[in-house]
Amino acid sequence: MRVFLNKKGWTINLVAATILLLGACSNTDNNGNEPLEEEDPSESQVSEVTVEHLKGEMTFESVPERIAVLDVQFLDHMLALEEQPVGTVFAETDNGLPEYLGDLPGDPELLGTYLEPNIEAILSIEPDLIIATDAHEDIYDQLESIAPTLVLDRMEDWQTVQLKFGDILNHPDEAQQIVDEYDQKVSDLKIALDEKIGDQTVALIRPRDDMIRLHTTEHRTAAILYEDLGLTPPDMATESTDTSSMISIEVMPELDADHLFLLQDDTNEQLTNEFKDTSVWKGLKAVTEDHVYEKNTALWIGYYSPLAIDIVLDEIAEELN
C-alpha cells in the first residue's frame, strides 16, 4: 500500500483500493450457487490518530516505517516502546550515542548533532517522517521538503511526549504503561526518601565557566527531585524564575545544602577539581558528611526521556535511600 501526504497540518492518508475477490469456493450454497468471498471489514478499517505539534496537527492513518529523529531523547522515547528510528542525531557531549542505551540492533544512521543536523544525511535515508524540535526552526523548510516534519517542544514534559510517540507508533497502551510505571516508582521512592532524609536539603549543581551553575526548582530535572520526589530544595534554588543561576565558590556555604548532586563530564572535570582543592569546598557540610554524589551531566540533564530518567531515579535511590 502506498502512503500519500496531503497538506492540512500534514495529513497522512493511507489509500487502498477496495478489492472484491471472486473465486471458486469448495462448497456451494443450498441453491448450488458459488458464494462471493466478502472482504474482511477489519482489513479496510484503519484507526486514525491526530498528534498536536508546534506547527499544527499531523494526522496518521498508518504507522510511519522510516522515522528520523533529531534529538537523542526522541531515540530514547522510541526505544522505550521497542521501536527504533532509521536515523538519529548524536549528542556532542558523548561524541556519539549515549552509553546508557547500549548496543542498538541495526545501528541507526547518524545524522549529525542535535545543534547541527546533517541535511544530506537525512535526505539519504529517505525518511517518511522527521521528528524535530523547536531548535530546528531555521531548517524546518528544508526538513519539510524531505518528509513530513513533526516539531515538538523540547522542554515539554516527557510524559506528554511519550504518549505522542505511543500514538505515532500505534503503541498507546504501552506508552501509557510507561507513564504509569514511572508514577508508581516515584510514589514508592518518595515515601522511602521522606522516611530516610526528611526535610534535609538537596541541590543539583554543575561547575561551569569558572562558576557553579545551580539548577533551580524551575529546571526540568530539578523538578524530578523537588516536585516528583518531594525533596527539599535550598532556599537559594527557589529564588529565581530561571532554570539555573550562577554562583561563585565563595557563595557555596550560603547554599548550605545537606546533599549535593554534582554534574560531571569531560568539559568541567578540571574546573571541578580546582573547586575541590579549595578550603571553601572542603568545609562544605555536604562534603564533610560525604553527601556529594557525582553524576553524568548528559544523562541527568540532556536526555529527558523515560529510559534515562529511570536510571536517574535509580541513582537517586542509591545515594539517598
Image (cartoon, helix red, strand yellow):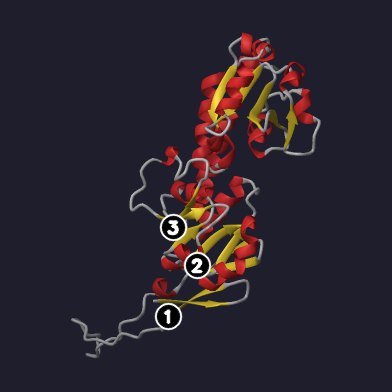
Crowding near pointer 1: few (<14 within 10 Å), some, many (20+)?
few
Residue at the right extreme of this rendering = 239
Residue designated by label 1: 16
For the residue carrying disc 2, how many other residues have a C-alpha within 10 Å: few (<14), some (14-19), or many (20+)?
few
* Label whose residue precedes the other's in the sequence (1 or 2): 1
Determine the residue positioned at 31% across, 85% down.
21
| Residue 80: % across, % down | 46, 46
Residue 313 image point, x, y percent? 54, 30
- Front: mark 1 or 2: 1
Mark 3 vs mark 1, CA separation in Å: 28 Å
Residue 244 x/y as whole percent? 72, 35
- Mark 3 residue element: strand
Q: Is residue 235 above or below residue 84?
A: above
| Secondary element at image label 2 | loop
Most foreground residue, 39 or 82: 82
The three-letter amino acid code for the residue at tag 2 is Ser
Amino acid on which the number 3 mark rests in the picture = Gly
**Among numbered discs 2 and 3, the one appearing first in the sequence:** 2
Q: Nearer the viewer, residue 166 or 306?
A: 306
Marks 3 and 1 in Cβ contact (< 8 Å): no
Q: Nearer the viewer, residue 36 or 270?
A: 270
Contact (Cβ within 8 Å) of mark 1 with mark 2: no
The CA span between labels 2 and 3 is: 26 Å
> Nearer the observer, disc 3 or disc 1?
3
What's the distance in space between the residues labelled 1 and 2, CA to CA? 14 Å
Position of the C terminus by quadrant? top right
* Number of numbered discs visible in the structure rendering: 3
Per the image, label 1 sits on a secondary structure element best described as loop
Q: Which residue is mark 3?
A: 87
